[in-house]
Image: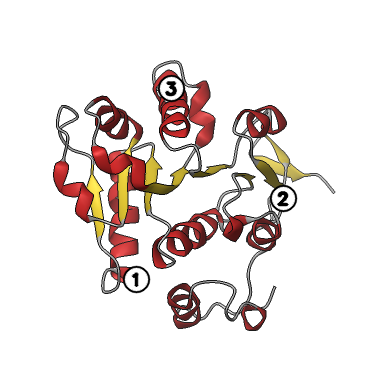
Amino acid sequence: MSLTLLDKKIPTLVLDSLKNQGITELRPAQTKALKAGLLEGKNLLVCTPTASGKTLIAELAMLNAILNGKGRAVYISPLKALASEKYREFRQRYGHKIKIALSIGDIDSSDGHLANYDLIFCTAEKLDSLTRHHSPWLKDIAVVVCDELHLLNDPSRGPTLEILLTILRDLVPDVQVIALSATIGNPKELAEWLDANLVVDSWRPVKLHQGIYFAGKVEFEE
């Protein structure tokens, strides 16, 4: 989908950022997400390959909510390093217009200062701690993005993520959940659990070739 068709449909701030990056068209998964209700507050489970554009889908949902006064957004990352990376990326793009915070530190702190921020990047463990501290600003969350949703299957971290999503949806019944993953074996079941529209696409920027390595040679399938 060409960006020229999206004037007045997506936040101008995001549109300008895309144009500044030289992006003129949305990728297939991003187009499908828009058609699935991304900007109408629908829950989405996005299952597409790595580098297919999942972050922009989350970006559109979060900025749409923040800039239209619907509430704040929270981006749950599986690792502190990834949360820090996303924080720097978004702060560079949008820090002049919205307040962006990174919360990955002491998990036994309520971090009351976060009430002053529009977009918060954190880990599941940190956000779980904030729910247990009954941070009052949590009720103002309009969008929660869960990156790497397949970690629900991780024995050590999965239960925390599952309980966290359940608590958030109970605490804020109208919250929009955007779940992202490149490797989910049962997407239909998870979409049903999240009450989400399923966005599946196989497009990737670099084509993968499958082959067999033997005796120093690789033979690729035709």
Helix, strand or loop at label 2? It is loop
Q: Which residue is mark 2?
A: 202
Task: Classify 203 as above or below 48.
Answer: below
**Residue on which disc 1 sits:** 93
Horizontally, residue 112 falls left or right of residue 218, namely left
> Which image quarter holds the N terminus?
bottom right
Residue that badge 3 annotates: 163
| Residue 93 sits above or below residue 204 on the image | below
- Disc 3 residue type (three-letter): Ile
Look at the numbered disc 1 and give the secondary structure of its residue.
Answer: helix
| Percent position of residue 45, x then y | 61, 42
Where is residue 53 drawn, in percent x and y?
56, 58
Determine crowd level at label 2: few under 14, some 14-19, many 20+ residues with C-alpha closer than 10 A. Answer: few
Q: Residue furthest top?
A: 155
Looking at the image, is mark 3 or mark 1 earlier in the sequence?
1
Which numbered mark, 1 or 2, is in the foreground of this view?
Answer: 1
Q: CA distance from mark 3 to mark 1?
A: 32 Å
Measured Cα–Cα span from mark 1 to mark 2: 28 Å
In this view of the protein, which residue sits in the foreground, 176 or 103? 176
- Per the image, label 3 sits on a secondary structure element best described as helix
CB of mark 3 within 8 Å of CB of mark 2? no
Kindly indicate whether the residue at mark 2 contacts the one at mark 1 (C-beta within 8 angstroms): no
Classify 115 as above or below 216: below
| Colouring | secondary structure
Q: Residues within 10 Å of mark 1 (few under 14, many from 20)?
A: some
Q: Sequence-wise, which precedes: disc 3 or disc 2?
A: 3
